[in-house]
Image (spheres, rainbow, N blue to C red):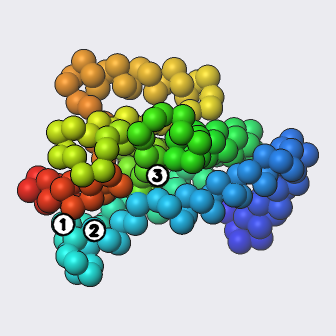
Amino acid sequence: MSFEDSILRNVERDQGRAEKLSPAIEKAHTRTQDIFKREAIDMDAFRQSAQGGGIYPDAEVEADMMRVKDLKKKFRLQETEEQEIVHMKASVAEGLIYRGISKYGWFPQARAIKTAEYDDFVNGIDIMAEFGDDGRIPQNVMGLMIDVTFSGNALEKKFGRIKKEIREGHLATIKYFHSRTTPALWENFLTCLA
């Protein structure tokens, strides 16, 4: 696809989206993206060269960032106009869940953690709700992993994948994580696992 074709496709996509997406959803999507950029776990903090010393070699973090960039590009190129609108609505729903947990107390004693892009795109985990009181040891902290889906076809596929993983004994994992409840204890625990 030429540069001009790409620009025209994006202009046409934006015009079609404007006709099918309410201004309120557009505004909510933009606000959600801003919140997530600010509050998501920063993968750079996990670099061994990072201030305080991360747990992963710089090259591994860089490779993970490139993988996310490639996946985002691939998804964007394959996404139809309708899928883009659904994706934006799912993002807004994800933002509502995140804010409900973190700001409005939907789950008592829970803190919402927006996962790093790697865990979102590669491991399929959008948000983690961490339950537990400050100062408790990690065994007394429970996490709930959340993946927001906004499409019937995708939901069926996801449930099929999740059931298969459970049958095979594979559960979802988060690679880039730090606890909001007991950061020092969790970071020491993760360092031992690395």
Instruction: Please give the residue where the numbered disc 1 appears in the rendered image.
Output: 55
Assign a secondary structure to mark 1. Answer: loop
Assign a secondary structure to mark 3. Answer: strand
Q: Residue at x 20, y 76 (%)?
A: 53
Q: Residues within 10 Å of mark 2 (few under 14, many from 20)?
A: many
Q: Is label 1 in contact with label 2 (beta carbons under 8 Å)?
A: yes
Assign a secondary structure to mark 2. Answer: helix
Instruction: Please give the residue where the numbered disc 3 appears in the rendered image.
Output: 114
- Residue 109, image x and y in percent? 41, 39
Q: Is residue 127 above or below residue 33?
A: above
Q: Residue at x 29, y 36 (%)?
A: 142
Spatial CA distance of label 1 from label 2 is: 6 Å
Comes first in the chain, label 1 or label 3:
1
Q: Amino acid at mark 3?
A: Lys
Front residue (pair 120, 192): 192
- Residue 161, image x and y in percent? 38, 26
Q: Is label 3 in contact with label 2 (beta carbons under 8 Å)?
A: no
Q: Residue at x 74, y 39 (%)?
A: 82
Q: Amino acid at mark 2?
A: Phe
Spatial CA distance of label 1 from label 3 is: 19 Å
Q: Amino acid at mark 1?
A: Ile
Comes first in the chain, label 1 or label 2:
2
Spatial CA distance of label 3 from label 2 is: 16 Å
Instruction: Please give the residue where the numbered disc 2 appears in the rendered image.
Output: 46
Dividing the picture into quadrants, the one containing residue 57 is: bottom left
Residue 173 relative to residue 103: left or right: left
Q: Quadrant of the C terminus?
A: bottom left
Q: Is residue 180 above or below residue 3?
A: above
